[in-house]
Amino acid sequence: MLFNANLQEFAQQVSYIAALQTNGKMSTYESYKKIKQQWKRLKKTHKQLT
């Protein structure tokens, strides 16, 4: 249940970051770094639950 909530939050964050990048508010590199950071957080949560 907790992982599912974290997965949904990850998807929302990625959508938000992508929108910022698409609208020119954030560089492609910065977007990549932020998504990678979110991915690492999600992965860590998954490992803790298994």
Image (tube, rainbow, N blue to C red):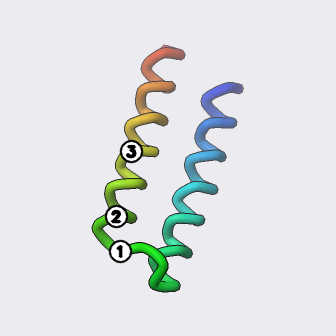
Q: Nearer the viewer, mark 3 or mark 2?
A: 2
Q: CA distance from mark 1 to mark 2?
A: 5 Å
At 52% across and 85% down in the image, what residue appears? Answer: 23
Ranked by sequence position, the earlier of labels 3 and 2 is: 2
Instruction: Pinpoint residue 11: horizontal percent, then vertical percent.
Output: 58, 54
How many numbered callouts? 3
Residue on which the image places disc 2: 30
Q: CA distance from mark 3 to mark 2?
A: 11 Å
At 40% across and 54% down in the image, what residue appears? Answer: 34
Amino acid bearing label 1: Ser
Residue on which the image places disc 1: 27
Amino acid bearing label 2: Glu
Ranked by sequence position, the earlier of labels 3 and 1 is: 1
Q: Nearer the viewer, residue 38 or 5?
A: 38
Asked whether the residues under the numbered discs 3 and 2 touch, taking CB atoms below 8 Å apart as contact, a structural biologist would say no
Q: Secondary structure at mark 2?
A: helix
Q: Nearer the viewer, residue 9 or 23?
A: 23
Amino acid bearing label 3: Gln
Q: In the displayed image of the protein, which residue is found farthest to the bottom?
A: 23
Residue on which the image places disc 3: 37
Badge 1: residue crowd in 10 Å (few <14, some 14–19, many ≥20): few
Instruction: Pinpoint residue 29: horizontal percent, then vertical percent.
Output: 28, 67
Relative to 33, residue 2 above or below: above
